[in-house]
Image (tube, rainbow, N blue to C red):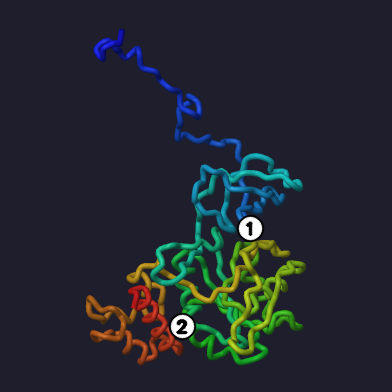
Amino acid sequence: MARRLSDYSEADAKVRPPKRGSRPRTKQRPAHEDAITGRVLAVDRGRFDVLVDGVRVRAMKARELGRKGIVVGDEVALVGDASGDPDTLARIVRREPRRTLLRRTADDTDPVERGIVANVERMLIVTAVTDPEPRPRLIDRCLVAAWDAGIEPALVVTKADLADPSPLLAQYAALDLPAVVVARSGEDPHDGLDAVRELVADRWSVLVGHSGVGKSTLVNALVPGAGRSTGVVNDTTGRGRHTSTSAVALELPGGGWTVDTPGIRSFGLAHVGVEELIGFFPDLAPGTEDCPRTCPHLGVDDCALDDWVSSGRAGAGGEQRLDSLRRLIAARAGE
């Protein structure tokens, strides 16, 4: 006889166990209290070289880190095999808080930030006097990125044996910016190289600049045996060829570490607010005090920066720096 619906009870219901077992899921993660701390020296296709107590350890990122990025200079916590022996692999389970982070975007409106290097104290902005020609607006962008990150910038002018560096240096004379001039790296007697060594001694530093200015050659002079690839400048385009393909930290003989980075052709600053930009031009910022309250500083509405520059109070490079600032403001506004 068929059972009526009213004859059924909850006891008749069949409960199927979950396919993956009956263990409940949890968001709690292990604390990894036994993890050891190291510092990332290189990143290569999902693998990381980490310095742990003088030993170079190969590691991968643990799943619990998700999309949290790891860059050269990061201090991280490791578990697993940290012996550094061949064919061993540790896991990065935690990224420690960063003191500084140098970052950039693809352009001035791109919301995606790209970390370059973490926890460095000084940035060496490397530019050549000629071959290739200097790009002051790129230098200005690097200065803004350094000050925004809390990193001390310095200017290193290379290939000074090929042309007079004085006009370029004059553009930044009004800034409290250390500047070093060196002869073409790799040529005897390495004029100015000792001054560069003083800038990077006993600290973590990073070298940035566009392709062909001699960053890798400079690194090879600072770190004997580094073996960083070097290239030449294209005679037609006047641009250098990328020789460094990834950032890597190298130990300096006298103490400290320096990070060589791939050559850059653009340095987006979408992460820097428009209202903050003027503060990163300390030679121009005082000139805005007489501007109208809503002045965009783009050369309209009686912007006081034009008088400030024409009076010479921004230094010899005032006109170029003002042009660079206005281009930045316009680019950040998407114009």
Instruction: Give left or right: position of 335 versus 224.
Output: left
Residue 307 placed where, x, y %?
A: 31, 89
Q: Amino acid at mark 1?
A: Asp
Q: Quadrant of the N terminus?
A: top left
* Marker count (numbered): 2
Depth check: give the residue in front, 262 or 55.
Answer: 262
Please name the residue that numbered disc 1 is placed on.
Answer: 44
Q: Mark 2 and 1 residues: CB-CB less than 8 Å, in contact?
A: no
Q: Residues within 10 Å of mark 1 (few under 14, many from 20)?
A: few
Q: Earlier in the sequence, mark 2 or mark 1?
A: 1
Mark 2 lies on a secondary structure that is loop
Where 16 sits versus 321, above or below?
above
Residue 104 placed where, x, y %?
A: 48, 67
Instruction: Give left or right: position of 282 versus 53.
Output: left
Mark 1 lies on a secondary structure that is strand
Residue drawn at x 38%, y 73% is 277
Q: Quadrant of residue 297?
A: bottom left
Q: As drawn, which residue projects farthest toward the front? A: 1
Residue 169 placed where, x, y %?
A: 54, 86
Q: Residues within 10 Å of mark 2 (few under 14, many from 20)?
A: some
User: How far separated are the C-alphas under marks 2 and 1?
Assistant: 40 Å
Please name the residue that numbered disc 2 is placed on.
Answer: 174
Residue 42 placed where, x, y %?
A: 64, 58
